[in-house]
Image (tube, coloured by chain):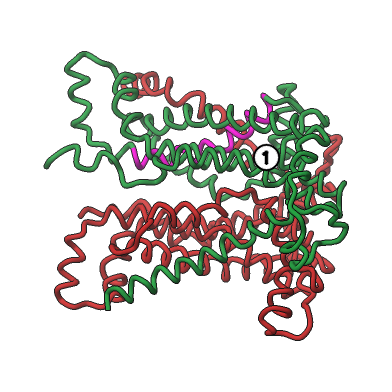
């Protein structure tokens, strides 16, 4: 007991302030959010909020818009997580090849989309995929490459609008995956590859049998972050389609934002948010377990 | 054979660059042309006379400079405080033992999976209680507070990989834990700290939803919010909007170039100890 107290006293100068801030701005809001989800919450006069029991959650399961938003969020994750991962890892592997020059330059340029602002990039894509011949992508496809006869109204239809949202998400995230894998690849001793090289193993085999197992902790970290980012995606849909046409490109996050800050239905929005958290937790659970477990020693 | 393969790889990388850089080229070209009452056609972009008028206008219009400075202040303060606090916390988790440490850490990590967007409402009520709504300290507090867990998680791994043997020289000289922290853990983690600095700067500079919700008065707006309103106000002034966007991108790129040497490199302490 004494000893525990002494340990707390020793560690508190390093922990206290950060811990207090985390309680105030992360843990408390989280608990409060769960609490609110059981109420018909009144923002102006919180003390008059009526208890809702499980009504908000029942609504989550009956609301047809949730079905649409859930479909879009899941599809976004299914497309953009593998998309970013494959392109990012491929780039890292290519840049890492011994004979490739200007490594720093490649790394720098491919990283520019990552450091660019989401708002700016989203509007940029909205203009690139504009209707008619003015839109750059239409111009490219119709007038330069002659692949299609008529310009596409990209943002007028559900599926093409979703494609634009997926493209911007992948385009912006690839550099992030690449940079992390580059760092990891650099730390793998060359000697491991030389043996495989001498046995005449194919590059693909070397990658699958040596590289991937060695970077498994990183893969877990990256996958969790990508899934988390995809399910919590917000600005790209908010800025590019505003959920339209006819709310068919809403994501879970944009829909709950709309419920909270347009309809001020915080109770319902919180219930959606709780379900969203559970979904992310479930989707990343297997990866989470492997994060602490594997410590690779060479 | 080997030469052909290398050429192919270089060609692939160049093709990739075209996809990555293309949209930016389009943005820059648009910002250099004027009289764009509708979205300028790609043909017009190539042939029109280029001018920097849009940049001068964007910089001078609508308190753009004020918003720019607001963003700079908020972002710099957030970056500084979160680096200082999260490295202290990571050190506590990496090199101290106390009851409930792992449980607490797990609780922290768990919060990373809860959607952040809904936290805004309770965060807002806390600021209200502290009388900090619509103030820079309030916004900075939210940014610092909500980013700490992620940075601590990131840094702890780096700190734990630093061999404890390095601490011995300090202990022999009679140095305490803070000396060890300052003269071993911080200098050896510069790559990690540099990486975090970039993440923190970029994330804060770019943040939109919280700033939109918490900052009410016009004079306190940050750049992302201002940009969004700017677009609403000058719907068809594409060149002007893109010029403003490009100015807004510059600080992040500068910060990235400053810290990029430190940026996610293999751990420096590898090789500092021979087994």
Secondary structure state at the residue bearing disc 1: helix
- Chain B as rendered: colour: green
Determine the residue positioned at 29% across, 27% down.
Answer: B184
Which of the image's four quarters has the C terminus of chain A? bottom left
Determine the residue positioned at 83% across, 39% down.
Answer: A43
Q: Determine which residue is flagged by label 1.
A: A32
Q: Is residue B152 above or below residue A127?
A: above
Q: Is residue B187 above or below residue A39?
A: above
How far from the left and from the top, in percent, is residue A237?
A: 72, 60
When asked about the image quadrant of residue B221, the answer is top right
Mark 1 surroundings within 10 Å by alpha-carbon count, few (fewer than 14), some (14 through 19), many (20 or more) = some
Marked residue chain, label 1: A
Determine the residue positioned at 19% across, 72% down.
Answer: A197
Residue at far left of view = B275
| Residue situated in front as seen by the camera: B39 or A273 | B39
When asked about the image quadrant of residue A189, the answer is bottom left
* Start-end of magenta stretch: B137-158
How far from the left and from the top, in percent, is residue B264?
A: 39, 46
Q: Is residue A83 above or below residue B114?
A: below
Query: In the rendered structure, does residue B144 fall within the stretch colored magenta?
Result: yes
Residue at far top of view = B174
How far from the left and from the top, in percent, is residue A58?
A: 75, 61
Residue B164 as seen in the image, left or right of residue B91: left
Chain with red colouring: A
Which of the image's four quarters has the N terminus of chain A? top left
């Amino acid at each position: 007991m004494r000893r525990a107290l002494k340990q707390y006293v020793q560690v508190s100068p390093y922990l206290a302030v950060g811990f207090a801030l985390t309680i105030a701005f992360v843990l408390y809001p989280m608990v409060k959010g769960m609490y609110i989800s059981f109420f018909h919450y009144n923002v102006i006069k919180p003390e008059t909020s009526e208890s809702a029991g499980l009504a908000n959650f029942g609504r989550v399961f009956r609301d047809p818009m949730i079905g649409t938003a859930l479909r879009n969020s899941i599809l976004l994750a299914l497309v953009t997580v593998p998309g970013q991962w494959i392109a990012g890892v491929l780039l890292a592997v290519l840049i890492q090849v011994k004979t490739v020059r200007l490594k720093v330059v490649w790394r720098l340029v491919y990283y520019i989309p990552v450091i660019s602002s989401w708002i700016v990039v989203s509007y940029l894509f909205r203009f690139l995929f504009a209707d008619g011949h003015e839109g750059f992508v239409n111009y490219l496809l119709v007038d330069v490459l002659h692949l299609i006869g008529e310009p596409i109204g990209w943002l007028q239809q559900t599926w093409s609008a979703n494609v634009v949202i997926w493209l911007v998400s992948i385009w912006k995230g690839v550099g992030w995956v690449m940079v992390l894998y580059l760092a990891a690849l650099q730390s793998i001793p060359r000697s491991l590859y030389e043996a495989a090289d001498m046995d005449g193993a194919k590059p693909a085999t070397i990658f699958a049998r040596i590289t991937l197992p060695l970077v498994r902790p990183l893969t877990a970290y990256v996958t969790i972050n990508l899934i988390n980012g995809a399910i919590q995606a917000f600005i790209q849909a908010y800025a590019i389609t505003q959920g339209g046409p006819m709310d068919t490109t809403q994501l879970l996050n944009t829909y709950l934002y709309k419920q909270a800050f347009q309809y001020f239905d915080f109770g319902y929005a919180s219930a959606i948010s709780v379900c969203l958290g559970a979904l992310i937790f479930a989707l990343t659970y297997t990866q989470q377990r492997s994060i602490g477990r594997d410590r690779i020693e060479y | 054979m080997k030469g052909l393969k290398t050429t192919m790889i270089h060609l692939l990388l160049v093709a990739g660059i075209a996809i990555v850089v293309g949209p930016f080229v389009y943005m820059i070209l648009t910002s250099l042309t004027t009289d764009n009452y509708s979205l300028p056609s790609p043909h017009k972009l190539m042939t029109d006379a280029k001018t920097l008028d849009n940049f001068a206008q964007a910089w001078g219009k609508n308190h753009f400079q004020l918003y720019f400075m607001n963003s700079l202040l908020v972002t710099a303060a957030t970056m500084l405080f979160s680096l200082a606090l999260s490295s202290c916390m990571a050190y506590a988790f990496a090199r101290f033992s106390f009851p409930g440490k792992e449980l607490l850490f797990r609780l922290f990590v768990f919060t990373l999976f809860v959607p952040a967007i809904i936290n805004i409402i309770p965060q807002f009520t806390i600021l209200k209680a502290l009388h900090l709504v619509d103030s820079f300290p309030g916004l900075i507090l939210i940014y610092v507070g909500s980013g700490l867990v992620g940075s601590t998680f990131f840094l702890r791994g780096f700190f734990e990989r630093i061999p404890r043997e390095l601490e011995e020289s300090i202990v022999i000289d009679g140095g305490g834990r803070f000396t060890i922290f300052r003269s071993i853990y911080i200098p050896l983690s510069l790559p990690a700290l540099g990486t975090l600095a970039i993440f923190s700067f970029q994330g804060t500079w770019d943040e939109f939803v919280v700033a939109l919700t918490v900052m009410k008065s016009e004079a306190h707006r940050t750049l992302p919010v201002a940009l969004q309103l700017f677009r609403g106000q000058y719907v068809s002034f594409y060149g002007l909007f893109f010029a403003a966007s490009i100015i807004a991108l510059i600080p992040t790129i500068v910060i990235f170039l400053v810290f990029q040497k430190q940026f996610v490199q293999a751990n420096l302490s590898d090789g500092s100890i021979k087994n």
